Amino acid sequence: DAGITQSPRYKITETGRQVTLMCHQTWSHSYMFWYRQDLGHGLRLIYYSAAADITDKGEVPDGYVVSRSKTENFPLTLESATRSQTSVYFCASSRQGTYNSPLHFGNGTRLTVT
Amino acid sequence: AQSVTQLDSHVSVSEGTPVLLRCNYSSSYSPSLFWYVQHPNKGLQLLLKYTSAATLVKGINGFEAEFKKSETSFHLTKPSAHMSDAAEYFCVVSDPKSNFGNEKLTFGTGTRLTIIP
């Protein structure tokens, strides 16, 4: 089925470890996004990408790295996980920029850092 | 700067009665406005969007919202609630500047809708 797929759905890791969250979309959307969702903060943008090989920071980029070598994939890496990065992470895509195009979200990855 | 305020963190209605979820926004430009719904353990799904066309916007599952510039509001309504409507609802604002390299949507903090059987 076409759509946006995140993996893994659940991940437990230890402080200091590197972890990568995967995101794959089948629509060939230009834009892709990573958000984190935390109680009391709503959704906050970590990074976004307007096209392959073009990425830019969002509101809360510190401690995260992204890459986009192919249009359909947008992995998010936590270089050295901290407890404050315990959260639910959502990948999203849109055909155009966010003013005109709605976002299509994956089902999220629940990350726990112990 | 843009902002969005969802006036109720939690709304409870009985099945079959009307739903009203309130959203006020602030934007220096002519914004786009969206409502998204999130069911447990799922991602957000678009309900409807306003992008400067008709002020009354119809969405999926019988929901609609009215853009009122004078009141800076974009309230979400449904005539008759169904059990399957129980979820978290997010109002989202995007201004035209976000089309030029600043892809920042502003999400409200959400309204949890509970349906009483």
Image (cartoon, coloured by chain):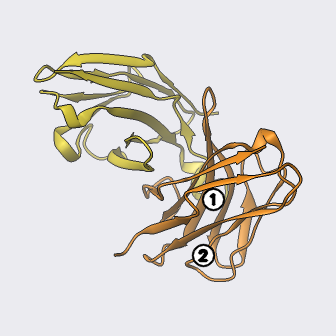
Chain colours: A orange, B yellow
> Image check: A51 left or right of B82?
right
- Which residue sits at x=74%, y=61%? A56
Q: Quadrant of residue A31?
A: bottom right
**Residue holding disc 1:** B100
Q: Amino acid at mark 1?
A: Phe
Residue A36, image x and y in percent? 63, 46
**Residue holding disc 2:** A73
Residue A100, image x and y in percent? 44, 56
Give the camera-side residue of B107 and A36: A36
Q: Is residue B112 visible?
A: yes
The secondary structure type at the circle numbered 1 is loop
- Which residue sits at x=54%, y=44%? B95
Q: Quadrant of residue B2?
A: top right
- Which residue sits at x=67%, y=59%? B101
Give the camera-side residue of B25 and B114: B114
Q: Quadrant of the N terminus of chain A?
A: bottom left
- Which residue sits at x=38%, y=27%? B69
Residue A70, image x and y in percent? 63, 83
Badge 1: residue crowd in 10 Å (few <14, some 14–19, many ≥20): few
Residue A72, image x and y in percent? 55, 78
Q: Amino acid at mark 2?
A: Asn
